[in-house]
Structure formats: C-alpha cells, structure tokens
Image (cartoon, rainbow, N blue to C red):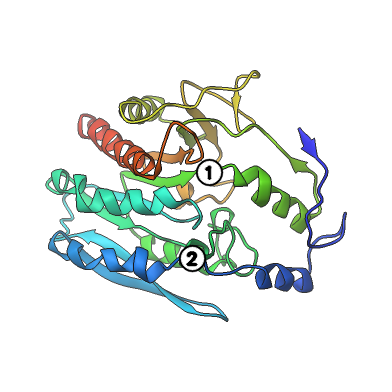
Amino acid sequence: MTANNSYPIGQMGQKWQDAEKKQWLAAQNVKRSYADDVLSQLAPLTKHFDIEEYAKLEYASNAFPVFVLRSLNWDKSKPNILITGGVHGYETSGVFGALRFAVSAAQAYHHTFNIMIVPCVSPWAYETINRWNPLAIDPNRSFYANSPAQESAALMNLVSGLDFLMHIDLHETTDTDNSEFRPALAARDAVDHQEWAIPDGFYTVGDTENPCSDFQKAIIQSVEKVTHIAPADESGRIIGTKMEQKGVINYPLKKLSLCGGVTNARFVSTTEVYPDSPQVNAENCIQAQVAAITGALDFITKTEF
C-alpha cells in the first residue's frame, strides 16, 4: 500500500539536502543512556569473555566507544560464531538479547565455538531511539566498501579477515516502522511511502542466495517455545515479502548491504521480534532473541561443519 508522505521535514518530491538532514538531527534528543544501560553490563562478563573497544564513533555531539566480546582462549581449531545487536539502535531486544546470551546461555557453547558478540553496533541510535545515525544514514543499508556510516565501517573492519560459520543479527520490527521510520525514509529520498501491516510475532530473515531453510526452521522452533510466531498476511507475505515457510522470509543480504551479509558465514539469519504485541513484554522479547541464538547453535552443533 502506498501512503501519502506528509513528513514534517523537507518538500514533497525533493530529496533531503544538508539543511534538511540538519533539521532532522536537531529534532532528535537523548532518551536513554548507552553507558548506564549497556556499558555497565560489560564488567561482569570478563569472567567468560575478552572485552575490547574495537572503535570509537565520533559525532559532533558526542563520541561513543563500541565493544566486542570474544571467547576467552580463542582457539583457531574451533569454528567462529558472530552475534550482532543494535545495528538499529531503537530495536532494544537486539541489544539486550545479545547481552543476556553472553551472561547466561553462552557458557554452554564456549567448548565448541569461538563466540564473538557485538551487543550494540549503533550507540547514538540506541540513545535517541533511532533507525538512522546522526547523518540520517541507515547503518543496516551501509555494509559496503567505503561505507559512509561509521557504525558499519567499524564492524566491517572488526570482522575483516575472519571466517565465521554462523552469524545471527538481532533485530525488531516495530509499529514505529510505519509511523516514523518509513515515512522519514520516503521524505529523505523523495519516494512513495510503501506501507505494510506490521506482523504480530517473531520471524526471521534468511539470505536469498543462501536460505538455509532447515537452519531457519530450527530457529523458529526454538523461539516458538518462548513466544508466538508471526503469521503471513492475506497475500502470504510478511512485510511485503513472500513467506518461504512458517515465520521465514528471505532478502538478498549482500545486495542490500545488510549487516547479515557482512561475513561469508555458511549459516546466517536476521531475527525480527515484535515488541509492540499485546502478547509480549520486554523480558519475553529478550528471551526470544536468546532462544533464536541457542536454537541456531544447537542446530549447527548437530550439523557436520
């Protein structure tokens, strides 16, 4: 469905220039603390992880250190696993799902895998509850060479040269996707606002080029023990894309420059939690993210690699 774009910044039919981007930035404000909510949780994790600042993101208003957690005693004979959260900073359970996994379930998998966790790729967006960074750039469309997004460039540099067996990128689909973020995108790029029904429930996004159907199924089966799975709409789609199996759609991850395509991992999935459902709360959303990770790891543990 196409909606008329009445976003309060910019002129209809004209792409944003620097003036409009500055106007948008001036309208953003800090709503929560990255230091209090995220960085404060890292110290206890030193029992099980090497924790390192892998970049400092420099913005006009502030600078944010970003951290990576690596299994202690990294063993080159073990396969490497990557877990990322907070690429879209407003998708809260992605950040806290990564941290919850690190402090709890991860301990059962260190003997089999080298685990790398980046819990909050986009800290400015976390604080301002945003999809974009301060330059009005979506980090999750910016995983390509010479990226204009510091967040994406820093993560690409971190994983460069490493081989990963699995990568799970933790996300949410929220009501604000239709009420704020897609209208803002339409205004910024002077395009029609394509609206779709926000699915009520959890789903995953696989890779069109490497769908890993059994892997996605295992994630869904693990998560549905914790929360409900999103149904397809009346046209058999989820967020405008054909549902391939229960709770699963596929995107061309590398073509779209998504975080899920940042490695050449054999097993890749992007999780999507729906935090605005009346059937869930914040804790349930975090549990769903952890269940997705453990379901994925349990599946590949049983798979020859």
Q: Is residue 82 visible?
A: yes
Which residue is drawn at the image coordinates 44% and 52% (left, top)?
A: 92
Q: Give the CA distance from mark 1 to mark 2.
A: 26 Å
Along the polypeptide, which appears first: circle 1 or circle 2?
2
Residue 213, x across and y down, in percent: 41, 26
Which residue is drawn at the image coordinates 52% and 63% (left, top)?
A: 125
Residue 93, x across and y down, in percent: 40, 48
In the depicted structure, whether residue 115 falls above or below residue 295: below
* Residue 205 tag number: none
Position of residue 104 in the picture relative to residue 181 (left or right):
left
Q: Which of the two residues, 270 or 60, is positioned nearer the viewer here?
A: 60
Which residue is drawn at the image coordinates 41% and 46% (left, top)?
A: 170
Q: Secondary structure at mark 1?
A: loop
Residue density around tag 1, few if under 14, some if 14–19, many if 20 or more, within 10 Å: many
- Give the labeled residue for mark 2: 127
- Give the labeled residue for mark 1: 253
In the depicted structure, whether residue 252 falls above or below residue 226: below
Q: Which of the two residues, 165 or 60, is positioned nearer the viewer here?
A: 60
In the depicted structure, whether residue 304 falls above or below residue 160: above
Residue type at mark 2? Glu
Image quarter for residue 8?
Answer: bottom right
Q: Is residue 305 visible?
A: no
Q: Secondary structure at mark 2?
A: helix
Position of residue 253 in the picture relative to residue 167 (left or right):
right
Quadrant into which the N terminus falls: top right
Which mark lies nearer to you, 1 or 2? 2
Residue 72, x across and y down, in percent: 15, 61
Residue type at mark 1? Leu
- What is the tally of numbered marks visible in this picture? 2
Position of residue 137 in the picture relative to residue 13 (left or right):
left
Residue 262, x across and y down, in percent: 45, 52
